[in-house]
Image (cartoon, rainbow, N blue to C red):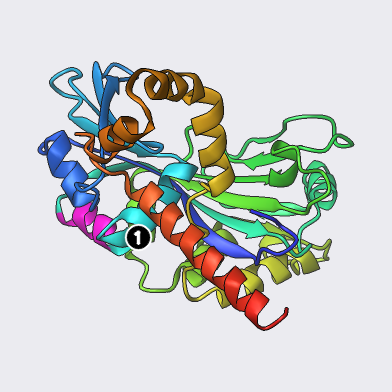
Amino acid sequence: MDSRTAENIVIYDWLSFTSKTHSPDDLIAALGLAHVPWTETKGARGYRDRKYFSCISVHYNGRADMGVWVEMSGQGCRTFESLSSVGWEGIFSFIRDNGLKITRLDVAYDDHSGILNIRDIVDDTLDEMFVSKSDCTDVRLSSNRKIKGTTVIVGSPQSKVLIRIYDKAAERGKLDEHWIRCEMQLRDDRAVQFTKIPLPIGQAYAGVLLNYLRYVEPGEDSNKWRWSMRDYWCNLVEDAERISIYQSPGMEYNEERCKRYVINQAGNAIDACIQMYGLYEFEKMIQERPVCRNPKYDILVKQHRFDMIAQRVMRWFGT
């Protein structure tokens, strides 16, 4: 994503939940992803086996009391948004209706417009110019305040609500871009309660964030919660509230990545097959392959065709 053209957005950026009453295939169906080609691989954290597709994992065959564990990373969430037939409300309803446990739900605000300055947040954190409602608050800095990529964390790893603010652009090595992320990591009942809030994601995010963390201006009142908020925190909350319709940033997969994979990783094998069977027979083998089609490649082909048509139209009109 190019932060110079991207808009500020609130997204779900991690989801993991467990079930002791459903099979892996049941949960894959509940995700609305039964149509994609899952692969079998080794599990993690005590689970022996795992079904995997594009950063979404369904772990199983652990101890009898472990059940099945579904885990979607940030990129897995983008895959889910692009390919699921049920969407977020569908999977959240399934989780609530079946009384399942959400072990982690991340809701993130991405600032591309310059509302947040990580140095200001670091300074205000060190100066204790904030109030937090977390049961256990632990503020840590991941590096020296002058080094880009600093992370501010409010809450302990065991907290049911943890706020993490960091320079996402620096994390990705894109130092010429502005991309500050302020994410809430919710667990257990706090995560389930968030999915019940009858508001658009931006308003729900802003309301919960205000309840748990505020950066404030020094005041005379003995109660810091009554101090005025820093301008940048007001602007963040107001901007998040305005994001009333969720917009998916889409899967981070493009034509160039596809080409690099085919040429650099599979190129030698493809070249050998063409030499052994000839180009015609190789193309026939590809067309008749027994492996299920991967929807993300279908999306890529459609986008490529659309781009080609757009280019022709632009040439016709001389633009």
Q: Nearer the viewer, residue 264 or 67?
A: 264
Residue pointed to by mark 1: 195
Report the residue that reaches farthest toward the bottom. Answer: 317
* Rendered position, 208 above or below 36: below
Position of the C terminus by quadrant: bottom right
> What kind of element bears circle 1?
helix
Where on the picture, by quarter, is residue 142? top right
Left or right: where does residue 97 sit relative to residue 78?
left
Classified by dominant secondary structure, the portion drawn in magenta counts as helix
Rendering quarter of residue 162: top right
Q: Position of residue 301 (x, y in %)?
A: 43, 54
- Crowd around label 1: few <14 · some 14–19 · many ≥20 (10 Å): some
Which range of residues does the magenta coloring cover?
A: 90-97
In this rendering, position of residue 319 left or right of residue 254: right
Residue 179 coordinates in the image, percent (x, y)? 72, 53
Residue 308 visible in rendering: yes
> Residue at left 20%, top 43%?
28
Q: How many marks?
A: 1
The answer to whether 75 is drawn above or below residue 61 in the figure is below
x, y percentage for residue 85?
Answer: 25, 59
Of the pair 259 and 59, the residue shown nearer to us: 259
**Between residues 249 and 179, which one lies in front from this camera angle?**
249
Task: Name the residue located 59 percent from the left edge and 72 percent from the top edge.
Answer: 312
Q: Is residue 296 above or below residue 273?
A: below
157 shown above or below 211? above
